[in-house]
Image (cartoon, rainbow, N blue to C red):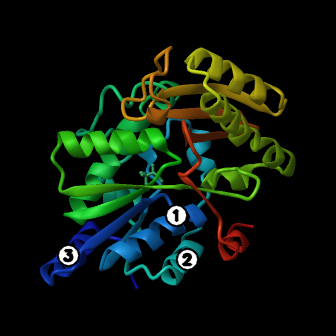
Amino acid sequence: MRVVETVAECRELLQQARATGRTVGLVPTMGALHAGHISLMTRARAECEVVAVTIFVNPLQFGDPEDIAHYPRTLDRDVEACTEAGVDLVFAPSVLEMYPHWPAPVATTVSVVGVSEGWEGASRPGHFDGVATVVAKLFSIAGPSRAYFGEKDFQQLAVVRQMVADLSLPVEVVGCPIVRERDGLALSSRNVRLSPEERRAAVVLSRALATGRALLEGGVHYSSTLAEAMRQVVESEPLVRLDYAVAVGHQDLVAREIIEDPASVRLLIAAEVGPVRLIDNCAGLEVASTQAVPARHLERIA
Ligand code: PAF
C-alpha cells in the first residue's frame, strides 16, 4: 500500500491504474477510522480493482473551532486499518496541499442549493459548502471512479449525489448501509468523545428512530405525529438535547405533513450529547440499511 501526501502523486497513481484498465474505488474520509469506514473499504475492495482512501480533516466544513480542535486524529492507526482492509493507496494531504492559501478564504467553492439547506445545513451554516467543495476537489484529483459514502450522513450523501449530477462529474456515488454497535448506536468518529454516561444515553437516538419507524409501519402517516413521538423518546433522556427529529422524502429531504408512500420516507435525527453532536437516520419501512459490527472491528474501536 502506498501513502501519498501530494495531489500530483495521488492523481498520477490513479491515472496509471486506469491506464492499465483498472477501475478505481474511492473512499473519502476524515480519518479516525472505525468499522463504518472499513465497511466502505470492504465494499470498494469487492467492486473495484484499485481502492484509494483519502484521509483529510477538512477545515472548510467545520464552523465551530472547538469541533475541529477536538476532531480525533489517528493517522498511524488509520494507515494500519487501511493496510488490513486491503487498500492500495492512502491520500493524506496537509491543509496547505489542499488549500494553498489557507487560512485565507478559498476563492472557489461549491454550493448545492435545496437539498443542503435544511436540517444539518440549517444547524451548521456553511458545512455542506465545505463538504461539497472538498469532495469536488477529491473527485477532480482521483478522476473517474466509484465513490463510497456511508448512509449515516444521509444529507451529505444527497448533497454529493446532487453535485455529481449537476456538474456531470465522472463518478458513480455508492451509498452504503449504516454500521451500528450492538445496542443500536450508529458508529461515528465522534463517539470516542462521549463519557460513559453520555455513551449510554446516546442510544436514545436509534431508539427514537425505531419508535418513528414502528409508528409508520403501524399506519401513522402524519409527519408531525412521528416527529412528536421521536421528540418524546429523546426528551426522556436528560443528557441529550434534541436538534431535530423529522420524517422527510428520501430524495429531496423535504418534510410533508401527509406521508403517502412510507417506503419513500427517511427518518432523520440530530442531537447534542454532552459536547458532541450526533446524527442518525433510518428508512421509513425497514432497517435494511443497517448492519451489525463484525466483532474484530469492535475491538479496534473499543
Ligand atoms: O463524511 C466525511 O467524513 C466527510 O464529510 C467527507 C465526505 C470525507 C468530506 O470531508
Mark 1 or mark 2, whichever is nearer to me: 1
Q: Who's the residue at 63% across and 55% down the image?
A: 187
Q: Relative to residue 244, is residue 130 depicted above or below?
A: below
**Which residue in the structure is indicated by mark 2?**
81
Q: Which residue bears the numbered disc 1?
A: 37
- Identify the image quadrant of residue 240: top right
Q: Amino acid at mark 3?
A: Glu
Decide which of tag 2 and tag 3 comes sooner along the chain: 3
How far apart marks 2 and 3 lie (CA) works out to: 24 Å
* Between 7 and 263, the one nearer to me in the picture: 263
Residue nearest the viewer, comparing 189 with 41: 41
For the point 31% across and 44% down, the residue is 161
Helix, strand or loop for disc 3: helix
Q: Position of residue 302 (x, y in %)?
A: 75, 67
- Of pointers 1 and 3, the one earlier in the residue sequence: 3
Which residue is more in the foreground, 229 or 73? 229
- Image coordinates of residue 177 in percent, x first then y, are 51, 55
Q: Are marks 1 and 3 in contact (CB under 8 Å)?
A: no
Q: Which residue is mark 3?
A: 12
- Local secondary structure at mark 2: helix
